[in-house]
Amino acid sequence: MKIPNPLLSIGLLAALPILQACERSPAWEGTVTDSAGITLVHNPSVPLWGEDEAWTVTEDLRIGTVAGEQQYQFGTIISLDAAEDGTVYVLDLQARNIRAYDAQGNYLRTIGGPGGGPGEFSQQTMFVGWHPRGEILVPDLGNQRVHRFAPEGDLVGSFPIQMQAGVPARWEVSSDGRTLAQIRGMNLPGMAALEEGDPIVVFDTTGTVVDTVALLPKGQTLEGISEQGAQIRVFAPEPLWDVDPAGSIYYAMNDRYRILVNDPEGTLARVITRDVEPKPVEETDRNAIRGLMREQYREFGVPPAQVEQIMQGVSFADFYPAFGNLFIGPEETLWVQRVQSARELAAGAEEEVEFDPRDIVSPEWEIFDAEGRYLGVVTLPDGFIPFTLKGDAMYGIWTDEMDVQYVMRLRVNRPGREGA
């Protein structure tokens, strides 16, 4: 992206804002090198934005209620997406349905419901995506198919999910109309192990894989998975990725601040790096996380003896992740979520609070331009998880202090842009 400059005009007065902008924006101190046709971008700790150039966000829509009409009460929002006209589609895993709301947040209709029949959802339905051809795609691992709905909610078709090829761990529908999924192998009978890593593949409308656009390193959270269980390593390296409007894939292992960019054809084109200080996982952190895991297993009805058996297989990485997530923002900017350790959380608190491991992901996101240069930081509302972007509108899930979920739309304000 181009850093905004004051508008040019004739005469001496026009030079003043230009000089001021130069004073506000420090020269970028990073390096760009070429390695066999791959652009390597290494970033300094000093951002490129000046004080008057930093982006901000403003909330302009919130959908949800604690006590009110049932159509606005959510159980467990697991995914959402938005159409170009601002219609929002929300997948509630607890209700096992999708609810549609217009651009002003008014309830429109409910799509699907619990079950195993056509247009019905299992408890393993994890994603809803708006396709540019005017369809709503809903992958359902339990029923092993991808549902296709018209905007009005009518089922228009489906295609199978071939689980023997691996588990589709994450889905995306790109702006250029591709249906992508990250495929994770499992050491289970009748299923591919995929030891080399997780391919990101492209499906056609019949469920056939027509392309592979990236190969992610294999995640290390689950080790030795089998029918008897798995070894769980908390904070172990895991792959994260997103796709930009042009179809390029941004991906990385979250233990290193090293983000790779594949072009739409799947060729590595750019590597973006930045030095960050590793944050050690302390014993108090491990104890807090073990306690939370035991509590969650009990809430799911797992017998106490089985809970302890599971906990025997839990271990920890030595360090926190280098970052929490990736997200593609306006103007093909890359947003990288900061991580905060338990010690940092305690230092920022006015009084002593019990460490909640879910709070390690920070509301602060580091922003890089389309060339990979570090611009600065944008702070999102605490408890907000972004899911999709339409223009300057960022849609996501916001969770309040009582763990009640809402759909929230934020407007990204960019100084120097019309309407910012």
Image (cartoon, rainbow, N blue to C red):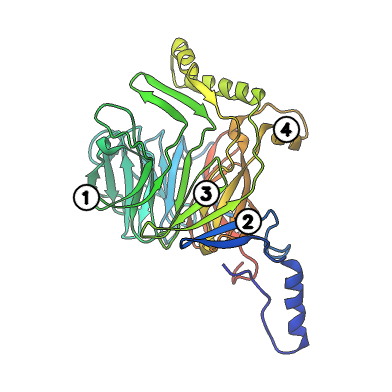
User: In the rendered image, which residue does mark 2 sit on?
Assistant: 43
Tell me the distance, in whole angstroms, between the alpha carbons under discs 1 and 4: 51 Å
Is there a contact, CB below 8 Å, between mark 4 and mark 3? no
Q: Residue at x 48, y 21 (%)?
A: 297
For label 3, the SS is strand
Left or right? Give the position of 177 relative to 400.
Answer: left
Q: Residue at x 52, y 51 (%)?
A: 259
User: In the rendered image, which residue does mark 3 sit on?
Assistant: 326
Indicate which disc, 4 or 2, sits on the residue closer to the N terminus. 2
Q: Residue furthest bottom?
A: 11
- Give the vertical position of 291 relative to 40 (above or below): above
Q: Position of residue 78 (x, y in %)?
A: 44, 39
Q: Residue at x 67, y 83 (%)?
A: 8
Q: Amino acid at mark 2?
A: Asn
Q: Position of residue 44 (x, y in %)?
A: 67, 55
Indicate which disc, 2 or 1, sits on the residue closer to the N terminus. 2
Left or right? Give the position of 173 relative to 260.
Answer: left
User: Is any part of residue 88 visible from this angle?
Assistant: no
For label 2, the SS is strand
Tell me the distance, in whole angstroms, between the alpha carbons under discs 2 and 3: 17 Å
